[in-house]
Image (cartoon, helix red, strand yellow):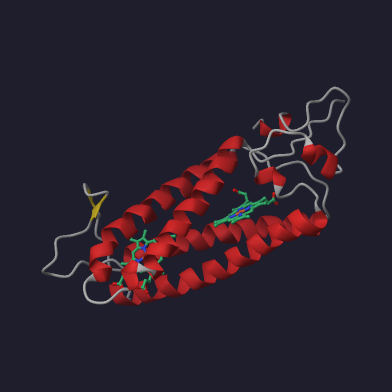
């Protein structure tokens, strides 16, 4: 039987993965940079902060839907390693969603301020009151969760670098956009004669 050596993540997943990285980097830079400034800085930057946040939410939702219909690259790690990797990735998704949701729950415009508008147009629906927690409490949890998310992203990036620099097993390349078959040389996945490695990895 012909084997299908999917060496890369689906193109859409790769695109959305790197879009998440870019949008998240911009979000972090704004949140810890100008938004953290004195006076009205937070209020002034909040509409952009929320607009980027909603963009990230859209990317993540699209990515999760896409993930349902796509397969990860074919590899042969131990079952425990496969399980741990999947668990970690699910956790990353859960954490980023938790940051987004608590951000929204923590939003409460000042009485004298007009509500923030996404991309200058769309009004942000005000969150419902949840339990005994105030919007301030959610904003606090939101800011703390960001640090936990950053810690896990740090571990994720470190893991990716270990694969790239030390193990050289094609895991990092599975998220890249190169269409060369270098990955097939690095990765010990059986390739059937006549199969075009790399390009088949882009199939869903
Ligand atoms: C992954 C996306 C997000 C990240 C990484 C992020 C990050 C942060 C950080 C680091 C802070 C603290 C800033 C400071 O110390 O001054 C903050 C505050 C806040 N964020 Fe987000 N945020 C995200 C998404 C959102 C979304 C989607 C919303 C609302 C729809 C939101 C609403 C808020 C609010 C209301 C605050 C509190 C501002 C204040 O101190 O009054 N965030 N965010
Ligand atoms: C420079 C930063 C990053 C690098 C170098 C990187 C690298 C990678 C690599 C190499 C993979 C493939 C892993 C595998 O096939 O087992 C991957 C997958 C993944 N990455 Fe990242 N990543 C980065 C940032 C992020 C960020 C910010 C998130 C946000 C939550 C994230 C979430 C994920 C998830 C959930 C997967 C699994 C694939 C999926 O379900 O979409 N990564 N990453």
Residue 25 in view, yes or no = yes
- Give the residue at x 47% y 58%: 25
Percent x, y of residue 5: 79, 34
Q: Is residue 134 above or below residue 198?
A: below
The answer to which of 61 and 178 lies nearer the viewer is 178
Residue 134 in view, yes or no = no
Percent x, y of residue 62: 48, 42
Outermost residue toward the top in this view: 194
Outermost residue toward the left in this view: 112
- Give the residue at x 42% y 47%: 58
The answer to which of 130 and 19 lies nearer the viewer is 19
The answer to which of 30 and 63 lies nearer the viewer is 30
Q: Quarter of the image containing the N terminus? A: top right
Q: Is residue 204 above or below residue 167?
A: above
Q: Is residue 8 above or below residue 27?
A: above
The answer to which of 59 and 161 lies nearer the viewer is 161
Percent x, y of residue 13: 58, 41
- Give the residue at x 73% y 49%: 171
Please give left or right for residue 83 compared with residue 22 in the image.
Answer: right
Q: Quarter of the image containing the C terminus? A: top right
- Give the residue at x 85% y 22%: 194
């Amino acid at each position: 039987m012909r084997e299908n050596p999917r060496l890369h993540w689906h193109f859409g997943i790769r695109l959305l993965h790197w879009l998440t990285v870019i949008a998240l980097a911009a979000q972090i830079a704004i949140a810890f940079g100008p938004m953290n400034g004195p006076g009205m800085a937070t209020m002034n930057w909040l509409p952009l902060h929320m607009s980027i946040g909603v963009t990230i939410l859209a990317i993540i939702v699209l990515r999760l839907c896409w993930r349902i219909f796509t397969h990860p690259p074919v590899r042969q790690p131990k079952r425990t390693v496969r399980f741990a990797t999947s668990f970690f990735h699910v956790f990353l998704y859960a954490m980023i969603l938790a940051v987004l949701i608590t951000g929204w729950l923590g939003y409460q415009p000042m009485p004298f301020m007009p509500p923030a508008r996404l991309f200058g147009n769309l009004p942000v629906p005000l969150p419902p009151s949840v339990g005994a927690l105030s919007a301030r409490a959610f904003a606090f949890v939101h800011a703390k969760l960001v640090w936990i998310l950053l810690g896990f992203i740090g571990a994720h990036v470190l893991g990716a670098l270990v694969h790239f620099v030390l193990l050289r097993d094609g895991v990092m390349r599975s998220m890249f956009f190169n269409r060369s078959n270098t990955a097939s040389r690095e990765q010990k996945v059986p390739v059937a004669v006549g199969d075009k490695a790399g390009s088949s990895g882009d199939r869903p």
